[in-house]
Image: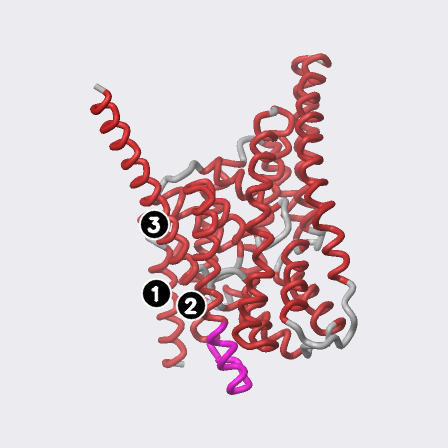
Amino acid sequence: MDEKTNVAAGGAEAKEVGARAERLWEVVGVFLRLGFTAFGGPAAHIAMMRQEIVQRRKWISDQYFIDLMGEVNLIPGPSSTELAIYLGYVRAGWLGLVLAGACFIGPAMLIVLALAWAYVRFGTLPQVGWLFYGIKPVIIAIIAYALWGLCRTVLKGWQQVALALLVVALYLLGVNVLILLFGGALLFGMVRWLELWRRRGKETAASLALPFALSGAGAMKGITGVWQRVAPTALNMGILAPAAPFSLLTLFLTFLKIGAVLYGSGYVLLAFLRTDFVLNLRWLTDRQLLDAVSIGQFTPGPVSSTATFIGYLLGGWQGALVATLGIFLPSFAFIPIIHPIAARLRRSPWTAALLDGVNVAALALMAGVLLQLGQNALSDVLTWAIALIAFAILFRFKLNSVWLILAGSAIGVVRFWLF
């Protein structure tokens, strides 16, 4: 019996090891492919991740995906990269966390590194506007299709719809993204709490508020502890002498600071980079900085791969690696920190309402980005036709978005040669 038991235990252990290895290979395959094909910025990346992970592979539910999306919007750093890291963590643990992030970031880093080499050698950027003529409307269709599915999960009542419309309107009017995320969470939480107060009475509402106070206090304690460790370093790193001599350490610490405190879009990243590298350090000119951000915008993967370009300009391939590591390293640290906090918040009815509010606000911000991108991408009859046909194909056949992106780029090439 003992021998049979040992054999059975060994077989179960071997199966578990095999299952873990299979999950890791799945993580590598999914995020490596996304790293090479995820054009269009964070909203498009998130839409493509949902298609791959929720719809095609069914790793998690739509509701859980939305929860993760809301959580990464609350922490600094590139949201789509952090979502990739988080999904890898959920699927395959710590090693999945590392592999998902590396596979999503790696292709963009290599492509940007090649473009940076060409830029240094030839002094100009390649002209690829004709290629993106067809890709941009496909990206619009991918984001719109993801929103269609997510709205059915998130917008379950008139309160969610009203909050989403309010957030979209305020976003288009230029209100800060953080104000909209935290304000949306607080407003929705208050509405839900008042509803429970009316339905169940003051005693029940107070009992719901108590878990919020306890879990909120625990969350704040964890966040405060992290901030107490990070903030002094971040503040000290911000005090850099103008026209400082170049060093890889300064380059790393500057990008580490940016990665640890950056919220918002590529335009916010541009402001951080200009302050540090143009005004304070005086290592770059405004023209070089704009070229760097342009490279990050039209390559696949995270926009923060701009760091790779800047690092190469300043310190060759060593500078590129150091800058890339600096800007993305905080994202790998934030995910395991926020995961247990978010899990506790979801268990409380009160704080669950706050997370629901964050999810609505995050979805509304995605819709706002879609409207802004659409103004640029849908410029004529052909681009509108590409977007509508791509949406119809996604809706009817659930085709992998990679094929649509390739088809869009081919249409752009054909149009360029014909006209």
**Residue type indicated by callout 3:** Trp
Q: Nearer the viewer, residue 7 or 415?
A: 7
Identify the residue under disc 1: 407
- Residue 261, quarter of the rendered image: bottom right
Please say whether residue 115 is one of the residues in the magenta stretch: yes
| Secondary-structure class at tag 3 | helix
Question: Magenta segment range?
Answer: 113-128
Q: Residues within 10 Å of mark 3 (few under 14, many from 20)?
A: some
Residue 138 lies, in percent from the top left, at 43, 60
- Residue designated by label 2: 134
Three-letter residue code for mark 2? Gly
Q: Is residue 21 magenta?
A: no
Residue 295 found in image quarter: bottom right
- The residue that appears at 36% across and 65% down in the rendered structure is 406
CA–CA distance in space, label 2 to label 1 = 8 Å
- Whether 119 is drawn above or below 407: the answer is below
Tell which circle, 2 or 1, labels the residue nearer the N-terminal end.
2
